[in-house]
Structures are given as C-alpha cells and as structure tokens.
Image (cartoon, rainbow, N blue to C red):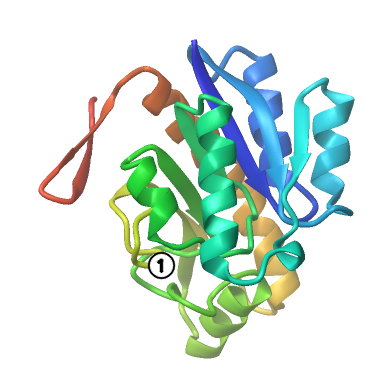
Amino acid sequence: MKNIVVLVSGGGTNLQALIDAEKRGELGDGKITLVVSSKPDAYALKRAKDNFIRTKVLARSEYADIAAYSKAMADTLKEAGADLVVYAGFMTILDEQVCRAFPNRMMNVHPALIPSFCGKGYYGLKVHEEALKKGVKITGATVHFVTEECDGGPIILQKAVAVKNGDTPEILQKRVMQEAEWKILPEAVKLFCEDKIKVENGIAVVEE
C-alpha cells in the first residue's frame, strides 16, 4: 500500500474527487492516510473527518517565515511515511526543503494547460480571468510533479476544456474542475501508485 498525504487550504473539492476515487477502487493500492491543512477553518478538513481520514492543521500564520513552515511540513510528511504528497488546492508555496525530500513524489493540479497561465501569482480565479482576457478558445488542467520552480515540474497528465462565449471566470473555473481537474488528478495518483510514471531528463513518461 502507498500512503497518500493530501495538502489543502480551502473547500477541498479535489480532495473529495480523490476520496470518491479511492472508494471506487480507482487509486490502485494507494490510500489517503492524512490530510494537512494550512488553514484551521478549511472545509476540506470536514470532508476528511467525514470519511474517517486523519487530519492535521499546520497553520502558515504560526510560523515566522516560509523556511520554518517548510521544515515543519517536511517533518510532518516524513513522520506520516508519505509515499506520495498531493497538493489539492494548497495555496502556500513551500521552499526547496520539501520537494528535495520528496523528489518526483509530490504532485499538483493546476487549472490551466501549462505552460500557459502558470507560475507565481497564477492560482484560483486569477488563472481563468487571464485565460478569458487573452481570448483563448481552449483551456484545461495539468497534473505535474512539484519542483523548486513554481508550476515548472514534469507534466504527468493534461486535459483540454473548451472556453465558451459568455463564460465568466467563475463559470470557467467550475467547468475546468468538473471536466478536467476531478478526472485527471485521481488518474495521475493511480498511475503513480501503479509505478507507471518515470521521469527521464526532466520529462514524465507515462506507461501506456
């Protein structure tokens, strides 16, 4: 069994997609054993507790700087025996201590087709606002490994989503979640748990 630790900050819709996938037997031999939140009032914590998953609050506000917070997170993940760490709406950028401790064992879902609309400052509705401003006709979501470069790690899976006339950032955000994020994140986790992802020269190669 592979221990999966999920990091959250908000509502936890991507966490719910993972929980539902696990219940359907769609995470391979992966099991969500811990949910860590950067905010004590995150609704994602209730989702975890409702499904009898252990939780921990590691509040960013209680640490002097990002280095101290990152060290505490790395220690927490090591103590949990994490095989895979999944960012599911986790809004704090951790420093290199964490990704160096878990190379190619941390993944994130980003609500755009990387390398478009990504990097520092591109999160939440901002991503969809910028996509609409640019007038793109196709957007989507990307699951990638987490590295020291924000949104710059090896791409595991991507799924395209159509942009429609009259879309608002909120409408587009919901469509990207439903049609892409909630599908490819569990799929990527399953691939990892089945040892079907290899990173070669900085590129993630998925076994077919």
Is residue 143 among what the camera can see?
no
Front-lying residue, 8 or 70: 70
Residue type (three-letter) at the residue carrying disc 1 = Cys
Up-down relation of residue 59 to residue 20 (above or below): below
Q: Residue at x 56, y 75 (%)?
A: 127
Up-down relation of residue 176 to residue 123 (above or below): above
Is residue 16 among what the camera can see?
yes
Q: Position of residue 137 (x, y in %)?
A: 47, 74
Q: Which residue is mark 1?
A: 150
Query: For residue 96, which quarter of the picture?
Result: bottom left
Q: Residue at x 43, y 74 (%)?
A: 119
Quick one: quadrant of the C terminus? top left
Up-down relation of residue 30 to residue 147 (above or below): above
Q: Position of residue 77 (x, y in %)?
A: 54, 36
Q: Residue at x 45, y 67 (%)?
A: 138
Front-lying residue, 139 or 84: 84
Front-lying residue, 112 or 7: 7
CA neighbours of label 1 inside 10 A, class few (<14), some (14 to 19), many (20+): some
